[in-house]
Amino acid sequence: MQGFVHLTTQNFNGIVMKKILCLSLLLAFQKLTIAQNYKKDSTTMKEMSNYILSNYECYNDLRYLCKQIGHRISGSPQAAKAVEWGKSVLEKTGCDRVYLQEVMVPHWVRGEEEAAIINEKGHRSKVVISSMGNAVGTGAKGIEAQLLKINTIEQLQRMNPKDVKGKIVFFNYRFNQTNINTFESYGPCVYYRWGAPSEAAKMGAAAVVIRSVSSAFDDKPHTGSISYNKKYPSIPSVAISNVAADQLEKLLITEPRSKMYIRTMCEMLPDVQSYNVVGEITGSEIPNEIVCFGGHLDSWDIGEGAHDDGAGVVQSIEVLRTFAN
């Protein structure tokens, strides 16, 4: 038994050593192969990148989308034109298949907008506003009410509802300019556009105005979607620029009983049919595995949507164009 065990142990050790040696050689070969493939792949990717950045088709696509079609708010004629354009461009890229996928989309229209700040002496000064996407309007007469400056949602929640009722709440929450990653600042700010209006409505506010969810210091208000809590009334909600918000903040320090007049004619219409535009290239080695990428064709109506998300759309098209050719 001892000899058997001993022999087995010696033979086993020899087998283990051979396996370790073989495994080491295999790993070394794999590392070499991976390094070679990586170098080859990185060179290929760099060549593709240089080609895309140099041939300007991507830039021309974006220029046409923004300048010839323009804004593409969901449910609009421009959004429909963007679908036709996207399908046409994809068909020219060399995709194996291009098709439209039916989808129902929201249809919100902005309509006329006007506003004014009214100081304690009754002097009115016009201010540029931008209704939040999907917001309700004020109706033709508009709303005029005393302003209530709120810096944080916690400040509002500590207040007595009777001190909020009937007023226009001015959410003065600032975009943090010190974050290098601007989305770290955008996240906390966007709540005041998305959810805070319902918190104000819960306490009886007549309307909400927010400081733009933006790092830009200009007089162009930033818009975006609002989501109403159905438990509470839906109230008009608008944004003013950071420049205008700074001026309003200063006014309310010296004249806290100042008012604001808001008139917005926006409304939500029934959903309309639109389409996702899909292009496909079937792989030659693993055709059943899928890599998916894309961008959204629609954009807000007060701009051209070059960044959000025209760039994502044309970049996606360019990937297909590059692989197809």
Image: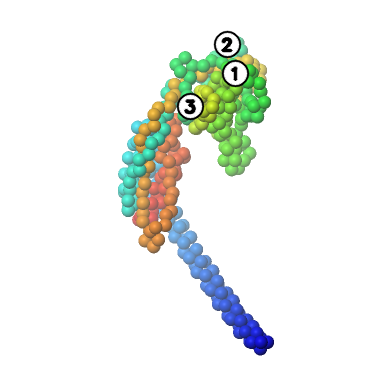
Q: Please state which of the two labelled residues, at mark 1 or mark 2, is closer to the viewer.
A: 1
> Could you classify mark 1 by the number of other residues whose Cα lies within 10 Å: few (under 14), some (14-19), or many (20 or more)?
some
Q: Residue 52 vs residue 205: left or right?
A: left
The residue where tag 2 is placed is 122
Q: Nearer the viewer, residue 44 or 212?
A: 212
Residue at 61% over, 12% down: 120
Query: Circle 2 — which element?
Result: loop
Which amino acid type is marked by label 3? Ala
Left or right relative to 151: residue 50:
left
| Residue plotted at (66% across, 17% down) | 254
Q: Which residue is mark 1?
A: 165
Amino acid at pointer 1: Lys
Amino acid under disc 2:
Gly
- The image quarter containing residue 74 is top left
Give the image location of residue 42, x and y in percent: 48, 60
Distance between mark 1 and mark 2 Cα atoms: 22 Å
